[in-house]
């Protein structure tokens, strides 16, 4: 069986109506498994309407492509040739930025294959703990606020791009991994490793001392300016979110 009920079997990029996932699409723990057990060589996680109040993490024990716990959100999930497309509607009847009800949704990715992660429509209160993943690229289009990313050791040059501005964003990479940061649009309260910049206009281009000679490294770019942005090295076993996963 190629696809379970509740999937969208055609082009994941098409416009599809929002509907609530049927109860029979879920098991007793609230997990949703629309992907076949036969894994592709690589995967892509794509949010088409923003990623808000979500935890993304790797899971080396998954049998299928991914697992998601989206709670009571009226969500659409599609799977096609290794591309997992998630469409979560914005909150109605008020500003979604002020919503603090319920648990954070969770998406787990099978750690046995490499992944690209793409968010269209902006990210708010998003934790991407990708430390156990082989990451090809990470892109957020539409701005990011209260975003925390824990990066894995890179293989080759791995790009991370935030388009539309970054506010209260923390990016952590493993100790000894080279990185470059480019910010277009100015920055306030920026930290890159041991360097702190209070205010800077125009374009900033910073890199670690070992960047030019490193074969495996991160290339991070932010357009639209940055406020309270930190790019640091991960030390020891510290991990997890700096905000409460329960959303309290």
Image: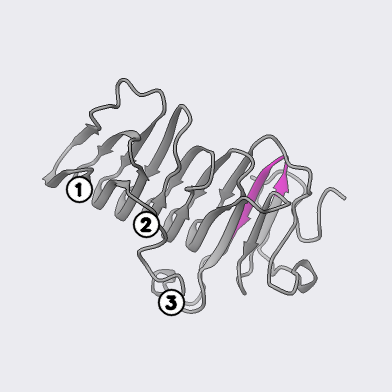
Which quadrant is home to the C terminus? bottom left
Q: Secondary structure at mark 1?
A: strand
Label 3 crowd bin: few (<14), some (14–19), many (20+), radius 10 Å: few
130 w.r.t. 245: above or below: above
Query: Is tag 3's residue or tag 1's residue first in the polypeptide sequence?
Result: 3
Q: Residue at x 52, y 56 (%)?
A: 56
Q: Is residue 170 found inside the magenta-colored segment of the image? A: no
In front here: 151 or 162? 151
Place of residue 120 in the rendered image (x, y in percent of width and height, measured from the top left)? 50, 49
Q: Residue at x 74, y 74 (%)?
A: 28
The outermost residue toward the front is: 236
Place of residue 243 in the rendered image (x, y in percent of width and height, measured from the top left)? 37, 67
Place of residue 124 in the rendered image (x, y in percent of width and height, measured from the top left)? 41, 60
Residue tagged by mark 2?
Answer: 238
Query: Is tag 2's residue or tag 1's residue first in the polypeptide sequence?
Result: 1
Residue tagged by mark 3?
Answer: 100
Quadrant in the rendering for residue 6 = bottom right
From the viewer's perspective, tell me whether residue 176 is left or right of residue 203. Answer: right
In front here: 71 or 74? 71
The reply to whether discs 3 and 2 touch (Cβ–Cβ < 8 Å) is no
Magenta stretch, residue numbers = 79-87
Label number found at residue 190: 1
4 w.r.t. 113: above or below: below
């Amino acid at each position: 069986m190629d696809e379970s009920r509740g999937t969208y079997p055609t082009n994941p990029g098409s416009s599809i109506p929002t509907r609530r996932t049927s109860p029979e699409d879920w098991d007793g723990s609230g997990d949703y498994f629309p992907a076949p057990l036969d894994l592709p060589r690589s995967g892509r996680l794509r949010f088409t309407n923003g990623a808000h109040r979500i935890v993304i993490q790797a899971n080396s024990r998954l049998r299928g492509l991914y697992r998601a716990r989206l709670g009571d959100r009226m969500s659409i999930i599609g799977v096609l040739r290794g591309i997992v497309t998630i469409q979560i509607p914005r909150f109605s009847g008020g500003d979604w930025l002020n919503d603090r009800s319920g648990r954070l949704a969770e998406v787990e990715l099978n750690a046995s294959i490499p992944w690209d992660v793409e968010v269209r429509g902006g990210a708010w209160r998003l934790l991407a703990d990708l430390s156990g993943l082989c990451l090809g690229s990470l892109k957020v289009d539409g701005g990011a606020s209260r975003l925390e990313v824990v990066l894995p050791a890179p293989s080759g040059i791995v790009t991370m791009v935030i388009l539309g501005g970054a506010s209260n964003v923390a990016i952590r990479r493993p100790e000894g991994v080279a990185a470059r940061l480019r910010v277009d649009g100015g920055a306030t309260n920026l930290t890159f490793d041991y360097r702190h910049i209070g205010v800077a206009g125009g374009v900033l281009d910073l890199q670690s001392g070992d960047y030019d000679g490193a074969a495996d490294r991160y290339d991070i770019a932010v357009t639209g300016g940055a406020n309270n942005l930190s790019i640091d090295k991960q030390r020891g076993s510290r991990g997890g979110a700096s905000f409460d996963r329960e959303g309290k």
